[in-house]
Amino acid sequence: MINCTQTLIDKLKSGRFKTNCKIEILDSNENLIEEITNYIIEGSISVDKDRDIRRNFTLTLDNPNNKFTPGENNLVWLDKRIRIYIGVNLSGNTWEYIPQGVFVFNSPKATSKPGLRQVVLNGTDKMGSWKKITTVLTIEAGVDIPTAIRAVLNGVETNFNFDDCTEVTPYSLTYQPGTEVKKIVKELADFITWDIAYNVYGELRFKPHPSNINQVASVWTYQAENYTLYAGSEKTIDDSELFNHIFVIGASSQNATVSAEAKDEDPNSPTSIPVIGDRLFLYNNGTADSLITTVELAQARADYELRKRMQYIEKQSIDMVSNFLHEEGDVITLVDSYTETDDKYELLKFDIPLKIDMMTAEAWKVRSATT
């Protein structure tokens, strides 16, 4: 959750507050050019943890004097950045502004019609400005991963916020010209299954994924008994990745195939074959894995895959009055007796209106039949 004062939290929880939007136009080094609080008609920000580029925005501005008309030498151009805030009125003339991200422009558009002079600004967080490498890039084995990421982004980004990490690249990596910088950085982070994305302050954040959200403090509780922010939810059981029968094929050094399978046939298991039917998963798409050379290795892989895939995802689609403090990955608590819900969930995606309105969010929790 975005840092703020307790006064602001209390104001949001009351469900009675005024808001406004403030934007800052920045140069390519993120130095302030101009602050704007007028002219803003409407807008929204889309946030999705499943995307590499986490945040997108759209913003409509009144443009009576061509102030925001896109142009090479104008206030709005492709070399500029925009920082967006949402302000909440605490009392009188006191406002607290909540950062919502630093963005680059994509395809700004000016409209001129009788009685209508507007500009629509669109864009993404700064990862959208990352391009492709133009020369061969080699990352040697044994380089610590944060150093490797910074090297890849040399000349692209300087604003880093990395958790401590001593893991190193397990082997040498070579990338050819034309490879997307985003792909390289993502692969480096995936070596240790860490998350890398821009946060609301425009920092490139590198941190581990939570291993168990039950052990993470909840930042907000939404419950049916309190409809000041919570406006209802829908619970869906996503079983598309649930399997109870695993088949693994390997190849021995003599080119003979080896195989093994694992099944959940426990009638007391809610996801077993007797209960929900046979759901077969073919490891490696049913192709022999050359690294699995013995029946013992094949069986170990089958047993591991069964444990991993005896699970389903519980998704919660939540309607709420705008809560501008959320970040993707927040752990929230949802309590609603009408859907038999009382648990923690990870917030994956949501849309933020830049003025008071309803917002929708999606949260999920992975549930395992083995726990």
Image (spheres, rainbow, N blue to C red):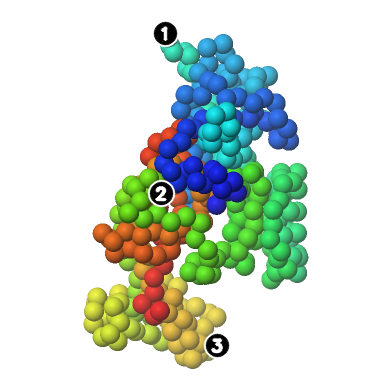
Looking at the figure, which quarter contains the C terminus?
bottom left
Q: How far apart are marks 2 and 1 (CA)?
A: 38 Å
The front one of 288 and 210 is 210
Q: What residue type is labelled 1?
A: Pro
Badge 3: how crowded within 10 Å, few (<14), some, or many (20+)?
A: few
* Residue 325 in the image, given as x and y percentages of width and height: 52, 46
Cβ–Cβ below 8 Å for labels 1 and 3?
A: no
Q: Distance between the residues labelled 2 and 3?
A: 51 Å
Q: Name the residue at 42% across, 8% down.
A: 114
Report the residue marked by disc 3: 253
Question: Which dot marks residue 114?
Answer: 1
Question: Which dot marks residue 361?
Answer: 2
Q: Which amino acid does label 2 sit on?
A: Ala
Looking at the rendered structure, the secondary structure element under dot 2 is: strand
Q: In this view, does 13 lie to the left or right of 74?
A: left
For residue 170, which quarter of the picture? bottom right
